[in-house]
Image (cartoon, rainbow, N blue to C red):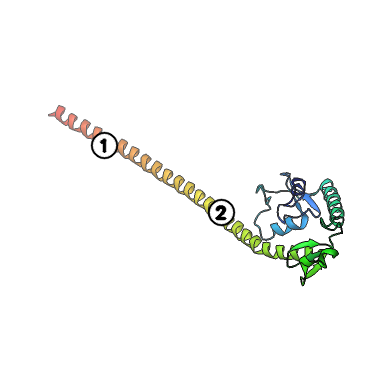
Amino acid sequence: MASRSEEDLCCPVCQDIFRDPVVLVCSHSFCKDCLESWWTDKPTRQCPVCRKRSLSNPHVSLVLKNLCEAFIQERDQRSSEALCSLHSEKLKLFCLDHQQPVCVVCRDSETHINHRFRPIDEAARQHKKDLQETLEPLKEKIKAFEQVKVNCDQTAEHIKVQARHTETRIRNQFKKFHQFLEEEEVARLAALWEEEEQKSQRMKEK
C-alpha cells in the first residue's frame, strides 16, 4: 500500500507517480499523457476529478515534476538497498512459487527447493504489466460509464428545455384565450346594453 506522501504524488487517472505532470485551473494535477488520453472522444474538456470545465490549456507543473523525480530516485535507491531479513543479502530475485523477493542465499535454501525464480526487476515489470492489463477493462468501463453519464445529462437538459418551451407555449395560448374571452365579454355586454337602450326607447315612444 502506498504511503500518504506517495499517494500525493500519484496521478488520479493511472494511479502511478506523475510523468510530465500538468495542472488545471481547478488545481488538480495529472500526467500530461493521461489527461490527453482522458479527453479523447470527450465532448468537453473536463477535469477527471471534479468535472470542472477547462477552458485553457493545462500548465506544466515544474515543482511537482521535480518532487516526483526526487521521490522516484529515492525509492529506487531504497529498493536497491533492500536486504533479506534472514541473510542480510540484497533482494535480487523473486520467487514465483512464494510470490516474494528473496536473496541468492534464500534461493539455495531448503525453503525454496525446486522453486522458480526471476530477477526482481523483471518480476516487477511483469507484475506491473499484469496490473495494467487488469486495470484496462476497468478503465474501459469507466469510459463507458462516463459516456452514459454525458448522454443522461444531455437528455435531462433536453427534457428541461423542452418542458420550459412547452410551458411558455401553454402560457401564451391561455393568455390569448383570456384576451379573447375578455374581448367577447366586452362585445356581448355592449350588445346587451344597446339592446336594452333600444327596447327602453321603444317603450318610451309607446
Q: Secondary structure at mark 2?
A: helix
Residue 173 visible, this orientation: yes
Q: Secondary structure at mark 1?
A: helix
Q: Which is more toward the observer, 128 or 206?
A: 128
Q: Disc 1 versus disc 2: distance between alpha carbons?
A: 55 Å
Q: Is residue 124 above or below residue 47?
A: below
- Which residue is tagged 1? 191
Amino acid type, residue under disc 1 in the picture:
Ala
Q: Quick one: quadrant of the C terminus?
A: top left
Which quadrant holds residue 25? top right
Query: Residue at the left extreme?
Result: 206
Q: Residue at x 82, y 57 (%)?
A: 86
For discs 1 and 2, the disc positioned in front in the rendered view: 2
Q: Give the image location of residue 9, x and y in percent.
A: 77, 49
- Which residue is tagged 2? 154
Residue 119 visible, this orientation: no
The numbered dot on residue 56 is none
Q: Which class describes the residues within 10 Å of circle 1: few (<14), some (14-19), or many (20+)? A: few
Task: Please state if 50 lies on the left or on the right of 184 as rendered.
Answer: right
Amino acid type, residue under disc 2 in the picture:
Gln
Q: Give the image location of residue 55, x and y in percent.
A: 71, 48
Q: Of label 1 and label 2, which has the lower sequence position?
A: 2
Task: Please state if 9 lies on the left or on the right of 187 as rendered.
Answer: right
Tags 1 and 2 touching, CB below 8 Å: no
Q: Is residue 115 above or below residue 4?
A: below
Q: Which is more toward the observer, 81 or 132?
A: 81
